[in-house]
Image (tube, coloured by chain):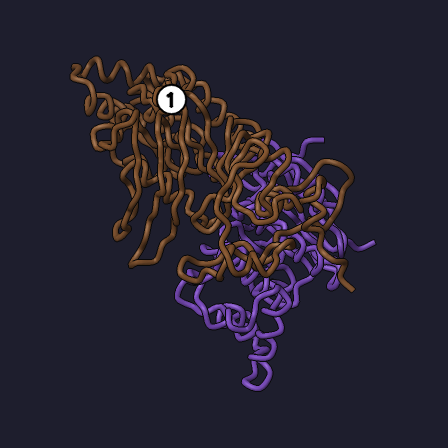
Chain colours: A purple, B brown
């Protein structure tokens, strides 16, 4: 059976430090796998290696059955839209000079899927999908609250029609009251679109309610 | 008797930017050695309030109202000495180009006329007290050579080494993971108790409040929403806003994918609705709420600003259950 994501014996070195030391995990469509553990345990490096933003030093990453680590950048390019990251700091992950609608339109333009006729409609749909009124499209990140900004980041990730979202502490920087709303949005999107979530989070209470399965990392390895 | 029960008193504190009030008349006391938590969403004015106590309101802010320490309105000499700050971001609070020990020693010498050698010894002892391993050697290291948790402990050492009466901690654990958060809070409360200081703890984490605060001030849109003993306010909230904050926390009990939420966002200063600022988000709001802002009044052992505190159900979370999507 083909998994959405099948990671085997992943290893990442930073100089002499082994940040990720033989991590294996699988993820199915529509499933949330939480990756829990203290700061510095290798959670975020695992996320980057899965996305091939940091090429792993050993191991395999199969995404929808395709082994990624042996592919060239050029070969990866058509696959990249299907696996999208959402980061912790919603302000830091959006260009402060770009209006929200331009940030959401950018993936469409880069991927050659933008037309003057349909593009703006698609952007409006995406903003609506994440619960942002159309007027927010004209704003810049600093004019949004943290929760609204994180919704914009999610809208941009959705613009690529992904199958997998790698969510790196997506609600850790948010007020609890806002956090619940963003988590509910992610739950809705998963139900409607069948997305797989690799969900990095160190908040046990959030993980317990939101994730289908949890694996814990410590010193670069999975704790069993 | 009454005055010695109160270390710091704040009356009708107002902080405005270009005539727009972000803090709109907040009053509270801090008692000696107590932990008072200041909670609310981003933009509620809690950090502004805390900073104003230290005379650190941002440039361009107009601060009005009365702040007294031991009955005296002259806080200039007390700031940095009797009142100290543990900032949110330890990395930017420390100078990157000076060894940590030198920075603590400078803080000692800014208050006490002691020799460099003595100041240095006190700095190392302070680092040792907060659990920095091999403190004498670590004192010579720069902040970038410290881990995030160690840096936060170093600023706690700096904030307590001159034995202040009040420590103001502005979101001291927001940037830390769960394990380090507990460690930093433990160190903070140990040091606070050792020097006999009170603590004003600014946070948006209600779990932290429950575990560490004697009393809690819930702020909304620059005003007091609810103020009282922690177990009273969080145990049976009388302000719908407090109930909403509590409801949006992941609860114990069976797993549920969707959490109750507080709908909407807090109003921006200058864009307040008429009446109660929370009314547009409040499931209990009536026409009265939309026309007249409630004053704080005493009820069941706490102060609360709400027209309908008696309408809050015992199971407060049910107030904010979302209707099931069709």
Residue B114 in view, yes or no: yes
Residue plotted at (59% across, 79% down): A121
Residue A169 in view, yes or no: no
Residue plotted at (56% across, 35% down): A41
Residue plotted at (60% across, 35% down): B234
Q: Is residue B157 above or below residue B76?
A: above
Q: Residue furthest right?
A: A1
| Depth check, front residue: B314 or A211 | B314
Q: Is residue A84 above or below residue A38?
A: below
Give me the chain letter of mark 1: B
Q: Say which quarter of the image contains residue B166.
A: top left
Q: Residue furthest bottom?
A: A117
Q: Position of residue B113 (x, y in %)?
A: 16, 17
Q: Say which quarter of the image contains residue A75.
A: bottom right
Q: Position of residue B97 (x, y in %)?
A: 25, 35
Q: Position of residue B221 (x, y in %)?
A: 46, 51
Q: Count neighbours of disc 1 (C-alpha within 10 A) and say few if under 14, some if 14 to 19, many if 20 or more.
A: few
Which residue is label 1 attached to? B2
Q: Position of residue B170 (x, y in %)?
A: 41, 37
Residue plotted at (37% across, 44% down): B48
Q: Say which quarter of the image contains residue B287.
A: bottom right
| Depth check, front residue: A127 or B84 | B84
Q: Secondary structure at mark 1?
A: loop
């Amino acid at each position: 059976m083909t998994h959405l994501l099948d990671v085997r014996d992943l290893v990442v070195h930073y100089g002499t430090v082994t940040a990720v030391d033989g991590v294996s995990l699988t993820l199915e469509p529509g499933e949330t796998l939480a990756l829990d553990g203290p700061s510095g345990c290798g959670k975020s490096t695992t996320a980057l290696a899965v996305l091939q933003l940091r090429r792993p030093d050993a191991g395999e990453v199969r995404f929808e059955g395709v082994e990624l680590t042996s592919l060239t950048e050029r070969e990866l390019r058509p696959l990249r839209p299907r696996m999208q990251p959402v980061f912790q700091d919603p302000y830091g992950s959006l260009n402060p000079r770009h209006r929200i609608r331009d940030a959401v339109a950018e993936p469409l333009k880069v991927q050659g899927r933008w037309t003057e006729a349909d593009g703006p409609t698609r952007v409006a749909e995406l903003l609506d999908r994440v619960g942002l009124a159309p007027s927010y499209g004209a704003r810049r990140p600093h004019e949004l609250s943290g929760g609204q900004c994180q919704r914009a980041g999610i809208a941009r990730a959705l613009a690529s029609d992904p199958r997998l979202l790698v969510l790196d502490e997506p609600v850790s920087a948010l007020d609890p009251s806002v956090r619940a709303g963003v988590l509910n949005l992610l739950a809705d999107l998963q139900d409607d679109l069948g997305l797989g979530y690799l969900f990095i989070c160190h908040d046990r209470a959030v993980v317990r309610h939101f994730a289908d399965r949890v694996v814990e990392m410590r010193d670069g390895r999975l704790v069993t | 008797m009454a005055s010695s029960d109160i270390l710091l008193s704040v009356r009708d504190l107002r902080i405005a930017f270009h005539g727009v009030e972000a803090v709109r008349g907040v009053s509270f006391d801090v008692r000696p050695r107590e932990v008072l938590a200041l909670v609310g969403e981003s933009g509620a004015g809690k950090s502004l309030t805390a900073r104003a106590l230290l005379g650190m309101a941002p440039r361009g802010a107009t601060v009005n109202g009365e702040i007294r320490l031991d009955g005296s309105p002259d806080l200039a000499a007390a700031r940095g000495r009797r009142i100290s700050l543990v900032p949110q971001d330890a990395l930017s609070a420390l100078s990157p180009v000076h060894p940590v020990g030198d920075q603590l020693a400078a803080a000692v010498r800014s208050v006490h006329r002691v020799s460099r050698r003595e100041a240095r010894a006190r700095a190392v002892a302070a680092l040792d007290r907060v659990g920095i391993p091999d403190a004498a050697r670590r004192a010579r290291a720069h902040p970038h050579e410290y881990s995030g948790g160690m840096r936060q402990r170093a600023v706690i050492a700096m904030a307590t080494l001159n034995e202040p009466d009040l420590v103001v901690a502005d979101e001291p654990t927001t940037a830390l993971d769960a394990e380090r958060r507990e460690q930093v809070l433990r160190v903070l409360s140990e040091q606070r108790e050792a020097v006999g200081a009170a603590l004003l703890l600014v946070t948006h984490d209600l779990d932290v409040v429950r575990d560490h605060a004697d009393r809690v001030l819930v702020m909304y849109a620059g005003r007091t929403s609810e103020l009282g003993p922690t177990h009273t306010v969080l145990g049976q909230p009388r302000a719908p806003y407090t109930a909403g904050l509590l409801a949006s926390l992941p609860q114990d009990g069976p797993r549920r994918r969707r959490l109750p939420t507080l709908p909407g966002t807090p109003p921006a200063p200058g864009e307040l609705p008429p009446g109660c600022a929370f009314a547009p988000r409040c499931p209990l709001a009536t026409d009265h709420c939309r026309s007249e802002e409630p004053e704080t009044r005493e009820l069941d052992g706490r102060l609360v600003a709400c027209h309908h505190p008696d309408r809050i159900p015992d199971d407060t979370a049910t107030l904010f259950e979302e209707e099931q999507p069709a």
